[in-house]
Amino acid sequence: MVALFALTTALLMGLADFGGGLLTRRAPALTVVFASQSIAVTVLGVIVVATSAWQEAGPRLWYAVAAGAIGPVALLSFYKALALGPMGVVSPLGSLGVAVPVAVGLAAGERPGPVQIAGIGTAVVGILLAGGPELRGAPVRRQAVALTFVAAFGFGAVMTLIAQASSTVTGLFLALFVQRAVNIAVGGTALAVTARRGRPVLPGDGGLRVLWSSLPLLAFVGLADVASNGTYALAAQTGPVTVAAVLSHLYPVVTVLAALIVLKERLRGVQAAGAGLALAGSVLLAGG
């Protein structure tokens, strides 16, 4: 089950990143984050009420609060790093967040077997290569690298924290709701500050009309993102965190394949090799 939940996480995260990338071509990244998470928190609120999940409230929810505060910072750091580029370096480096949950798992006493160690190494190399790292060309700005590491650590921390925020399925609904509510509070504050400084918070061409027409994609991105956090929490609670973390971080492969299918982008040789290695690593992990 750990492999099933973790691979579902990778699928959802990869598609959410792809959809978010499309949206940020039309609207400011902060607005995309706020709007998509607002939809997610509304749906989660309905689920919490319907399942009486509020009865699961307890000290563990502080993990969800922390995850909610870190998430927007990590995501906006990642978008800023992508803007500074080059994307071929930033994107694969962002997946290094896998080190956080893996380190937590090892610290908790998990000891992967030889086959799983081989799978972890193979998958991590594949994940990095799947992003299509640019080994030549324009130099990488230090600020881009620094922001990417902030984002990577943040993504890994969010996954680790949300896995600790509940021990039951209904408790997980409540934890995800709290996480997203904090996301909205942090993102909304940042959006208000941005607007007061006179910076654009709406698409330059079309304004609210563009956002309204993008509502289905915004909903998909927000719900896929929150669902991926949920399936990762289930994966981490079902089996070894080291296995769950690495399999979940196969999401760059999904993003690359989505761009190939939907946008007809060409798959570079290094990306094809990376995808193959990532999938081989996942087979080793699942079988080990």
Image: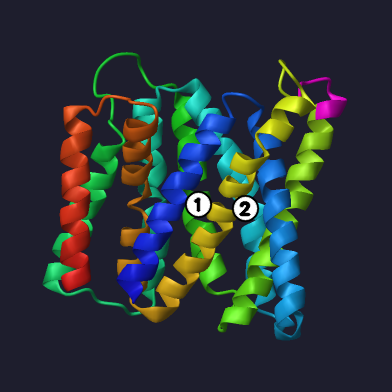
Picture quadrant where residue 98 is located? bottom left
Q: Residue at x 35, y 17 (%)?
A: 139
Residue 171 % position (x, y) = 63, 79
Q: Is residue 196 magenta?
A: yes
On the image, the x and y values in percent for residue 217 come to 59, 40
Near mark 1 (Cα within 10 A), the count class, few <14, some 14-19 or many ≥20, is many
Q: Amino acid at mark 1?
A: Phe
Provide the residue designation for mark 1: 155
Picture disc at residue 263: none
SS assignment at label 2: helix
Camera-nearest residue between 58 and 140:
58
Looking at the picture, which amino acid does disc 2 mark?
Ile
Q: Chief secondary structure of the magenta span?
A: loop
Q: Earlier in the sequence, mark 2 or mark 1?
A: 2
Please identify the quadrant where the C terminus is shown.
bottom left
Q: Residue at x 39, y 55 (%)?
A: 10
Q: Mark on residue 70?
A: 2
Residue 135 found in image quarter: top left
For the question of whether residue 18 can be seen, the reply is yes
Residue at 34% in and 77% down: 1
Left or right of 154, for residue 52 = right
**Colour theme:** rainbow
Crowdedness near tag 2: few (<14), some (14–19) or many (≥20) residues, C-alpha within 10 Å: many
| Residue 144 screen position, x and y as percent | 47, 28
Using residue 230 as the reference point, say whether residue 275 is left or right of it: left
The answer to whether one can see residue 103 in this image is no
Instruction: Give percent across and percent down for residue 21.
Output: 51, 33
Which residues are the magenta region? 195-200
Dot 1 lies on which element? helix
Q: Using the image, determine if residue 276 lies above or below residue 161.
A: above
Against 157, residue 92 (above or below) is above
Q: Nearer the viewer, residue 48 or 91?
A: 48
